[in-house]
Amino acid sequence: MEQPIYLDNAATTKTAPEVVEAMLPYFTEHYGNPSSIYSIGSAAKEAVTQAREKIAATLGARTNEIYFTGGGSEADNWALVATAEAYAAKGKHIITSKIEHHAVLHTCKYLEKRGYEVTYVDVDENGILKLEDLKRAIRPDTILISVMFANNEIGTVQPVREIGVIAREHGILFHTDAVQAYAHLPIDVEDMKIDMLSASGHKFNGPKGIGFLYIRTGIKIRSFLHGGQQERGRRAGTENVPGIVGIGRAAELAFSKLQENGAKEKMLRDHLIKRIGEEVPYCRLNGDAKRRLANNVNYSFRFIEGESLLIMLDMKGICASSGSACTSGSLDPSHVLLAIGLPHETAHGSLRLTVSAANTMEEMDRVVDAVKEIVGRLREMSPLYEDFIKKQK
Amino acid sequence: MYSEKVMDHFQNPRNVGEIENASGIGTVGNAKCGDIMRIYLDIDDDGIIRDCKFKTFGCGAAVATSSMATELVKGKSIEEAMKVTNKAVMEALDGLPPVKVHCSLLAEEAIHAALWDYAKKHGIEIEGLEEPKADIHEGEEDEEEY
Ligand SMILES: Cc1ncc(COP(=O)(O)O)c(C=O)c1O
């Protein structure tokens, strides 16, 4: 069989060989505990410090503002829950968007059950936050605004700087889930007035289960995991040293080729968008055409259901994803697609293709050909298409 | 996630299509929940299902259960077709993942809806057949824990 074509880089990425290589000695040789005083421990400690320095530099942050976590979800949970607790005396109101990742949305639901109020601000039909609605949602007791940097399903990039300015003007903390954006887009926490930022290693060719939360100096949120003094007492537990070395190396690699990779991805993305849009009837590009991650393509195909499409693509060796209910394990399709105004049946027929710089144009052509054929086949089987065609006559 | 039989019926669905002047047509499910099944029956004067075709909008399991259901009722009498339950469809497919069991219910419901349509057109009553629900997801609620 031909090599599979991996187009699900928003779900996770291949760990770069350089990253694996950098990590290995921290399993085999420098396995010491960073808190120990002997030398194999201090080698590990030194490596953790270096990774922290590298990452801080990519964001315009200070080294001691980076806290390693067990991934993006933990960073999101921590930012929201700890802020809610620490600032409860000021107020119990949080503002977020309707299209956040579940790591944020379900944490908000958790807080709502514990006496906090959350406003879920609308997005427009392209998934961009309505800034006027955001301003209107601000109350004297608002303690936090949490809006994702870029959306994982439709790739829409938010006006983060504008949101940061609004939050700062009102003395409200601003957290951004940058899991899809970090190491893909330039980010400056000073310029963008970001107070907290979540990122995850496996979204930029680093290892899984390692991420970080940037916390601006002076923010008084506390420990999420209680125990030892690791991460300045804010996140207890012996450090995942190989993971931390890996995320540091992955960040270094990604930032050294940020422009180059972005340009390559954009070329692949635009080719997919153009060919699918021109060659597959009754489709719709979801997300903003311009303010969009360089790696993201998201189309809805009317009259068909996403899981069937994914299985058929898989049989042709193409890895993709969908926002259909069947793939989410519930009866409802993706909340993101519903928030941008898609009817349920169109949301069920969505396909997300997320490229990486390692993909080729030839692969893109093979994918478009496969999508065309499969969508046609599924429509032939679809009672919705049958009804539609009969109505046309 | 799916059995080999399910994958086979998904990849090579049997009896896809429409029947012109069908004796009975049943459409169940709704687009909101992501699956719709339509079954066409051709029933002769002796009450034998001569032909059966389907069209389905839905996931792999929805397509496979529709395909299997048509296989199970084709050539059968109405009474025999009434015995094609969701369990029978599932067993014939070597099982379904728990989250997909509703697809087999939909297949059973689609056959019943087509038989109901046939019975109504011919002014007859089929023992054990009840008017199909408009939406088989009625009453089902997602439960989420935070
Ligand atoms: C926007 C966003 N936030 C959070 C997460 C969760 O990250 P992790 O898988 O590292 O917990 C993801 C990844 O699925 C994501 O895309």
Image (tube, rainbow, N blue to C red):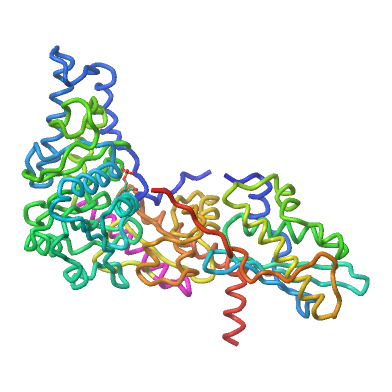
- Residue at 12% over, 51% down: A195
Residue lying furthest right: B46
- Magenta span includes A263: yes
Q: Nearer the viewer, residue A299 or A66?
A: A66
B95 relative position to A329: left or right? right
Q: Position of residue A371 (x, y in %)?
A: 49, 62
Q: Position of residue A278 (x, y in %)?
A: 42, 73
Q: Which residue is painted at 51% across and 59% down in the image? A: A331
Depth check: give the residue in front, A279 or A207. A207
**Furthest residue to the bottom?**
A393
Q: x, y (%) of residue A229?
A: 16, 26
Prevailing SS of the magenta stretch: helix
Q: Residue at 32% x, 55% y: name it.
A: A152
Give the vertical position of A390 relative to B91 (above or below). below
**Where the C terminus of chain A falls, by quadrant?**
bottom right
* The quarter of the displayed image where residue A118 is located: bottom left
Residue A226 spot, x, y in % from top left:
23, 31
- The answer to whether residue B114 is above or below residue B88 is below
Q: Would you identify the image quadrant in which residue A64 lies?
A: top left
A71 displayed left or right of A171: right
- Asked whether residue A295 is drawn in magenta, I would say no
Q: How many marks?
A: 0
A81 displayed left or right of B22: left
In the drawing, does residue A136 fall left or right of residue B109? Answer: left
* Residue A356 visible to an observer of this rendering: no
User: Which residue is located at x 64 percent, y 44 percent?
Assistant: B3
Q: Nearer the viewer, residue A83 or A66?
A: A83
Residue B45 in view, yes or no: yes
Q: Which residues are magenta?
A: A260-284
> Image quadrant of residue B134?
bottom right
